[in-house]
Amino acid sequence: MGVERKQSEFTEFYQSTRDDCLRIVLVAVGDQALAEDLVAEAFARAWTAWRTVRRHPAPRAWVVRTALNAHVSWWRRRRREMPLEGHDLPVPADPSSALDTAVVAALRRLPIRQRQVIALRLLLDLDTETTAQMLGISPGTVSAHLHRAIATLRGDIALVHGRASPHTAATNQQRGVTRHMEAQA
């Protein structure tokens, strides 16, 4: 295949599929700028592997999967970054809108996987399937980590604020988690 023909074929593919790929990746990652970067990276990889991609049964799906894989790699690199203790929290414009220090402390005490699940499921409002894909674990494992994290957070925060004894906190955790899980269903 000549270079000009290859370039023409790829240009046509790019122009006809870019917007669809961008929309799909945007839904998955929820950030326009990040989605654009990921799709650009995926199309760059498609160009370098065009001989293989053009024979793929679904080249557009190849590009989307490559973009989502790039996102997973990006997420893993970011996960390994070491925050400076106490220097990684943004300063809120309004002091009354700051997170309760007990909540922040309780979140930091959670195991890393539980913190990741809390961040993705509750703070970013991703669904269980997407969270599972992002973390490379099963949806059932996501639910188990979420359940354990919420129970731990409720107990820790209740104890810090002196609202309950450990036994009462555990009972309230079980009730609260049950309500939360029922609301999620």
Image (cartoon, rainbow, N blue to C red):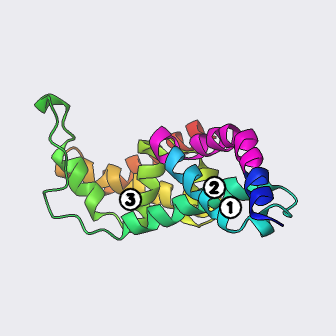
Amino acid type assigned to the residue bearing label 3 in the image: Arg
Image coordinates for residue 184, horizontal then vertical, percent: 58, 40
Query: Which residue lies under the disc numbered 2?
Result: 43
Q: Label 1, label 3: how many angstroms apart (C-alpha)?
A: 34 Å
Query: Which residue lies under the disc numbered 3?
Result: 115
Residues drawn in magenta = 11-34
- Foreground of the two, 40 or 155: 40
Foreground label between 1 and 3: 1
Label 1 packing within 10 angstroms: few (<14), some (14-19), many (20+): many
Pointers 1 and 3 in contact (C-beta within 8 Å) = no
Quadrant of the image containing the C terminus: top right
Image coordinates for residue 151, horizontal then vertical, percent: 41, 54
- In the rendered image, residue 13 lying in the magenta stretch gets the answer yes
Disc 1 is placed on an element classified as helix
Amino acid type assigned to the residue bearing label 2 in the image: Phe
Query: Which residue lies under the disc numbered 1?
Result: 46
